[in-house]
Image (cartoon, helix red, strand yellow):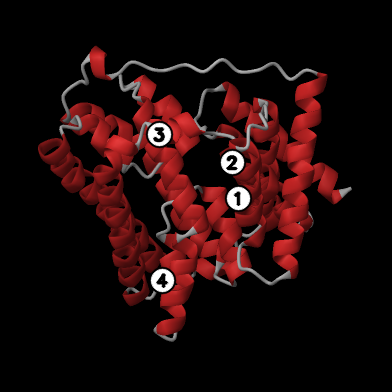
Amino acid sequence: MQTILTLTLCTAAGLLLYRRRVPAGMLIGAALASAVLSAGLHLEGVPSISKHIAQVIAGVFIGCSASRDDFRKLRDFYKPVIMITCSLLLVNVVIGVLLFFTGYSDLLSCLVCAVPGGISDVTLIAVDFGADASKVLLIHFCRLVVGVAVFPAVVNRITPPVSESRARLEKRKREPLNASGMARLLTALATASLAAWLGNLLGVPAATILFSLVTTFALHFSGFEIPFPSWLRQAAQVISGAYIGSLLDPERFSNPVTVLWAVVITVAVLLGNAWLFGNWMERRFQVPLREGMLMLTPAGASDMALISADIGVNSPRLILVQIYRLLIATAIFPHLCLLLARALGG
């Protein structure tokens, strides 16, 4: 009954923010509702298996988000992509080390706080790695708020508009979810679930999201079309939010000054990185400054599709770079953080 009550209230809170057009409203609303229920009413929240359910759905969503043709379009854009990867990795290490020296948390948790991925994916990965999920969630929640509420306004104000010729959006026709589409979706979910189970059986860190993502990519690139309805992604956001919201433990934030410094450092480094490398890409690769800065925004790929259109950037390569960011942040960066923390004894 507690699980049903938690999911019901999380869904209601998520729908409230979603209908108010808040980006990632389903996730934010569910996380806030779950945090209030957990901290205020001391409810146990949703069972831990919900974490794996949400990660499998997220892996399928990421795996069917891009096609071969989409990635072929990045062939002439590989140099900026390499530079973006290096800048994100540098920022990951810089923020993680600075947070560690401020005393925010242990080294592994601080490094995971700086992983440039989505709030739900990275927080769930933090649980798998044994990092402090509450502190990771707090930093990524602040990143999300900055990414969807502050960053676009700042970019819109300090950068010139992108010309219409460079901002043409390539719209894909989405296949309706008929009986055949539902069968393929269920097949993909079952295959991803089996792969995730095998990955966990082998003891691979973050196996659920990683193995489900790679398996779906293999299916998708083999020609197996996978329709993905928006309601399923929203359901996954509610489940993720309900789980990660319950991880917020107020007792872990007994020193508000340390928390404030951690948030300020994270936001300042992210904004500085976007400005520096955005200007560099404009000079070296003729990428419009507004588009370049948005490629390095703290927001995630799904949020970016809405945010970029709101400020006049409808660039397909922007979304593709965001998807690429999501992939490396999910499959590569957390493992690098784990290796670095182990190497330094953190």
Residue indicated by mark 4: 104
Label 4 SS: loop
Residue indicated by mark 1: 214
Please report whichever mark, 1 or 3, sits nearer to the chain's N-terminal start: 3
Mark 1 crowd level (few <14, some 14–19, many ≥20, 10 Å Cα): many
Label 2 SS: helix
Label 1 and label 3: CA atoms lie apart by: 18 Å
Label 3 SS: helix
Identify the amino acid type marked 2.
Gly
Give the left or right position of residue 146, taking residue 230 as reference: left
User: As displayed, is residue 139 above or below residue 205?
Assistant: above
Residue indicated by mark 2: 63
Label 4 and label 2: CA atoms lie apart by: 34 Å
Identify the amino acid type marked 3.
Arg
Residue drawn at the location 44% of the way across and 68% of the way down: 336
Residue drawn at the location 60% of the way across and 50% of the way down: 214
Residue indicated by mark 3: 72
Q: Is there a contact, CB below 8 Å, between mark 1 and mark 2?
A: yes
Residue 95 placement (x, y as % from top left):
32, 63
Please report whichever mark, 4 or 1, sits nearer to the chain's N-terminal start: 4
Residue drawn at the location 62% of the way across and 36% of the way down: 220
